[in-house]
Image (cartoon, rainbow, N blue to C red):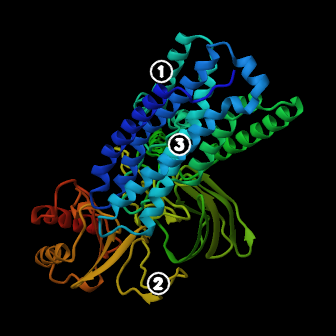
């Protein structure tokens, strides 16, 4: 007995249901796509994918159970083999066409914004393929497995449980669990809709490689029941299934290997737990000075660094530095030979250096900030390179402390990055911030602004001119405007803190629906200069 799509009523019902699903998803997409471009469009697209995936899961489950419950599985499999499962191919073709339609609609709506470009379109394509097409492919295969249950009530129960586990709501049930446990449970998230995603406005792409590897691994393991049903020769089944199992194991191993999980903010739990176990004030008075740094950083999945530093004054028996605890030191050399060192938490101690020149090699993945090949944001107050003395990295309320270096940096500042140039600083700098993301630089009047490439609403030159007027009015008269760099986040409002690189930067972050005001700016500048005096 071969299953076919000859039932016209069934075809009509299928078309109507699928049409309603498409319309429902488009209705969810339109508000996002009609707005000026922002990272939120990507996440809203991903959230709507849940309903898309549920349609294919339900339909695959229904079609499979239809002939299974009719008792024709043995006959269908033995006589027709892969032909008895032709509906799986049909569902996959429908999935492909529907994905193209959804992506096309999203692009059309996004193109209404003046900021729409190829970068945004590629990010949108990657998100739609990951959360719609591949997730639906996995759900079709999963529906095939559920549909093979021979009890109708059991099929309904298993389907409902599966739908709950795949839903974004399920993630909220364990959002307070340990970060590593959440990481395991997130393996069940086919849609990968970034329930915990960090709202980082300077970078649009939220589909790192480990997400692709994970979903491909899940698809391979779900293919095994289909291969068993449709492959005639026993040796062929064993060989193919063994290969699929090896691919699945490799994909899972890659997924659980160390990566930068900045995109998944639940990994904040790891550093919160670490600092909750720290007791007392660890900070000490610094009794030595670093006169020179030569820092070489290679960004990939994490950071691989070599820091050459020069110490001032007579050599001491031991030197203690602050270096973030997830960055592990691999070697320390001085005077051409290895020297003894110890690393405990955020503190590195080097014993009996042979000369004032020390080379420190270290590597690791930072859980607090993005530091990868595609996205970097390392603020100047964060110890991603060795800082002289013991400094507090995280305060009692788990907020990042302002770890500042103490070296006078009237030195030549050079870089080998493209599109930049060698220059000299003429003022004191207490740290270096590294930013590599989707941003634009605008020079308006006496100020240089760094703003996100994709913002909602768009930040216009007139907005920045108005901001200049406020700054001119409120900043001290001896403030060197020409060297000011102002980093602006969405909606160019101020939080209750403002950060700076030496005297070089005002950090303007996000307060939804609230633009910069004289009162906000006055408070921020006062706090900024109070902190600078500290």
| First in residue order: circle 2 vs circle 3 | 3
Residue neighbourhood size for the residue with mark 1, other residues' Cα within 10 Å, grouped as few (<14), some (14–19), many (≥20): few
Q: Which residue is mark 3?
A: 94
Contact, mark 1 vs mark 3 (Cβ under 8 Å): no
Report x, y in % for residue 233.
87, 31
Position of the N terminus by quadrant: top right
Look at the numbered disc 1 and give the secondary structure of its residue. helix
Look at the numbered disc 3 and give the secondary structure of its residue. helix
Contact, mark 1 vs mark 2 (Cβ under 8 Å): no
> In the image, which disc is placed on residue 420?
2
**Residue drawn where x is 54% and y is 61% of the image:** 372
Specify the quadrant of the image occupied by residue 404.
bottom left
Report x, y in % for residue 475.
16, 76
As measured in the structure, the alpha-carbon distance from the residue carrying label 2 to the one carrying label 3 is 48 Å
**Viewer-nearest of discs 1 and 2:** 1
**Viewer-nearest of discs 2 and 3:** 3
**In the displayed structure, does residue 418 sit left or right of residue 449?**
right
């Amino acid at each position: 007995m071969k299953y076919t799509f000859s039932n016209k009523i069934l075809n009509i019902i299928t078309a109507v249901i699928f049409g309603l699903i498409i319309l429902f998803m488009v209705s969810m997409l339109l508000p996002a796509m009609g707005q000026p471009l922002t990272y939120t469009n990507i996440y809203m697209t991903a959230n709507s994918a849940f309903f898309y995936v549920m349609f294919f899961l339900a339909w695959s489950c229904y079609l499979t159970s239809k002939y299974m419950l009719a008792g024709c599985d043995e006959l269908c499999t033995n006589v027709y083999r892969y032909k008895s499962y032709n509906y799986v191919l049909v569902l996959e073709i429908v999935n492909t066409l529907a994905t193209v339609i959804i992506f096309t609609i999203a692009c059309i709506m996004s193109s209404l914004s003046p900021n729409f470009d190829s970068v945004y379109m590629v990010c949108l394509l990657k998100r739609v393929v990951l959360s719609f097409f591949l997730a639906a492919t996995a759900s079709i295969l999963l529906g095939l497995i559920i549909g093979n249950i021979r009890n109708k009530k059991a099929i309904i129960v298993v389907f409902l449980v599966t739908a709950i586990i795949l839903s974004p709501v399920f993630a909220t049930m364990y959002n307070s669990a340990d970060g590593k446990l959440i990481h395991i449970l997130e393996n069940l998230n086919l849609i990968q809709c970034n329930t915990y995603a960090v709202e980082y406005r300077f970078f649009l792409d939220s589909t790192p490689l480990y997400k692709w590897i994970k979903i491909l691994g899940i698809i391979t393991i779900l293919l095994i029941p289909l291969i068993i049903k449709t492959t005639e020769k026993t040796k062929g089944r064993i060989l193919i299934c063994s290969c699929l199992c090896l691919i699945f194991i490799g994909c899972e191993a890659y997924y659980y290997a160390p990566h930068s999980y900045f995109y998944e903010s639940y990994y904040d739990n790891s550093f919160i737990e670490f600092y909750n176990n720290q007791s007392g004030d660890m900070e000490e008075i610094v009794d030595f000075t670093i006169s020179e740094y030569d820092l070489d950083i290679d960004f990939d999945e994490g950071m691989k660094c070599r820091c050459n530093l020069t110490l001032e004054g007579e050599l001491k028996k031991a030197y203690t530095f602050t270096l973030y605890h997830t960055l592990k030191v691999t070697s320390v050399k001085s005077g051409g030979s290895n020297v003894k060192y110890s690393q405990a938490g955020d503190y590195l101690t080097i014993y009996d250096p042979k000369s004032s020149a020390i080379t420190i090699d270290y590597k690791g993945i930072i859980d607090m900030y993005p530091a990868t090949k595609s996205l970097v944001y390392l603020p100047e107050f964060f110890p991603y390179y060795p800082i002289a003395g013991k400094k507090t990295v995280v305060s009692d309320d788990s907020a990042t402390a302002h770890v500042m270096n103490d070296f006078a940096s009237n030195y030549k500042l050079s870089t080998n990055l493209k599109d930049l140039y060698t220059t000299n600083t003429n003022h004191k700098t207490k740290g270096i911030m590294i930013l590599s993301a989707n941003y634009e630089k605008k020079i308006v009047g006496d100020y240089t602004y760094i703003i996100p490439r994709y913002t909602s609403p768009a930040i216009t030159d007139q907005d920045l001119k108005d901001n200049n007027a406020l700054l001119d009015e409120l900043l001290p008269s001896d403030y060197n405007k020409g060297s000011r760099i102002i980093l602006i986040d969405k909606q160019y409002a101020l939080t209750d803190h403002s950060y700076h690189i030496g005297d070089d930067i005002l950090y303007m972050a996000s307060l939804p629906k609230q633009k910069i005001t004289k009162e906000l700016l006055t408070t921020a500048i006062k706090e900024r200069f109070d902190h600078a005096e500290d």
